[in-house]
Amino acid sequence: MEGSEFEEHGAQMLHYVTSYMDSVRSRRALPDVQPGFMQELIPSRAPETPDKWEDVFKDIERVIMPGVTHWQSPNFFAYFPTAQSYPSMLADMLCNAIGCIGFTWASCPSCTELEVVMMDWLGQLLHLPDSFLFCKPGKGGGVIQGTASEATLMCLLSARTLFFKKEREKNPDVTMGQLVDRLVAYCSDQAHSSVERAGLIGAVRMRKLETDEKGSLRGPTLKAAILEDKAKGLLPFFVCATSGTTTSCAFDNLKELGPVCQEHGVWMHVDAAYAGSAFICPEFRPLIDGVEHAMSFNFNPHKWLKIMFDCSALWVQNTDYLRYAFDVDPLYLKHENQGVMPDFRHWQIPLGRRFRSLKIWFVLRLYGQRKLQEAIRKDVRLAHEFETMVRSDDRFEIAADVILGLVCFRLKGENELSERLLKLLNADGRIHLVPSKMKGNFFLRLAICGPDTQSSDVRRAWDVIRELTDVVLKSDAKS
């Protein structure tokens, strides 16, 4: 494909994308296909000679769209949002055209320097403590990761290396192997599965601590666990606190957890993957009061801030601690300006990295803080609107406090009723939800996800839920 053809076909694709977005509401949110469906639609081998663009373009609807889950649909209420916007798409086009691999400053100075500035822009929008920012005195700074899962793993491994370094200063003969068997990390029983997975990869035990009735990990619980483990000869070194759990959008109590971690020399990492975007609104920022005690903080702009996947923002109060764990410096990656600006390959697990800060730059400039705040507040209002509908029907109950854009609800009675309702809803296909469970209660999660979701979409979802609830309860009455 030559440049002139790219321009022509690109215009056709841009039209298709905008048409798709304009009509996504009319598509079934959850596809009605079975595993292996695509094997009957495309050949088993790649073509020996080029296909025509026209044939490839036609196959988007024939082959791809039947199996697409439409996350941007106003009828998609599952998981959490995955952000999308035209400015972010345009930035990705430029990123793909430039095609740099920005592992060092020298490999693409603009890639590194824009990321430094954008991480400060984001940090200031969230009113993070100055100690996390490049532009303030100290050793703080931020880096774009692929996902919150990577950020958690990065911080756990950095904390492990830092702990080992401090122990070696006390006892030069101690080995990593001798310490690893005794290391223990902590998270709440509501933490994302990626936190437990980080412990598996880091070869350390991850102890899940019980939360209170609202799904929040409290300081006294953590302190008791640390003292108990120290009495056993174990070595507490890391805590992952969650601000906005996947299960119910619960918030661990950072103001209580932070001082406990500082008292016992434990690295506290804050995972705010979904909720972090909301902290650009002053009314939601108190949800992370106590973050000043954290060694690291992470959220995903690619969930709720119009910046498309992948873009996960991680800040640390001392960036040296990342380099302790990941600094490998072969001659072919050295350059004359080392140490003046970050070489972000030392701040992440992979070597290669895309020019992801372009997405942040485009979105923040073309939306501005106020429009981004308006979008978040709109989604929160819709969640409370749905909450009011649920509370108005005495067959249902709210299963967790509605704080941001997630509503957890269930049919009163045995879990089996809500399980049957969910199965009917997703088989019906008009809306898509996923479940969760806390303190033994199975419930449905309705998250405001589509960027264009409106009050009418939420009311329609409630109508579908009530309609299928009638089916469940009539069937239950007959049995």
Image (cartoon, rainbow, N blue to C red):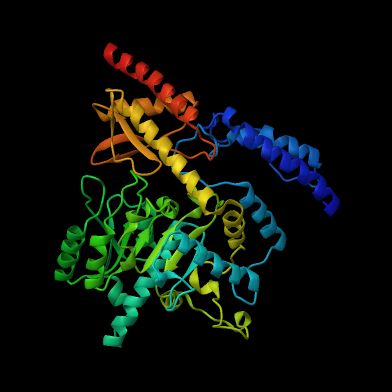
The spot of residue 123 in percent (x, y) is 46, 63
The spot of residue 146 in percent (x, y) is 51, 59
Most foreground residue, 425 or 80: 80
Answer above or below: position of 220 versus 474: below
Answer above or below: position of 135 versus 474: below
The spot of residue 26 in percent (x, y) is 59, 27
Judged left or right of residue 339, residue 403 is left
The spot of residue 6 in percent (x, y) is 80, 50
Residue at (32, 76) in percent of width and height: 163
Q: In which quarter of the image is the C terminus?
A: top left
Q: Which corner quadrant of the image does residue 322 belong to?
A: bottom left
Q: Can residue 75 be seen in this view?
A: yes
Judged left or right of residue 472, residue 214 is left
Residue at (50, 33) in percent of width and height: 454
Most foreground residue, 50 or 280: 280
Residue at (33, 78) in percent of width and height: 164
Tally of numbered discs = 0
Q: Is residue 171 visible?
A: no
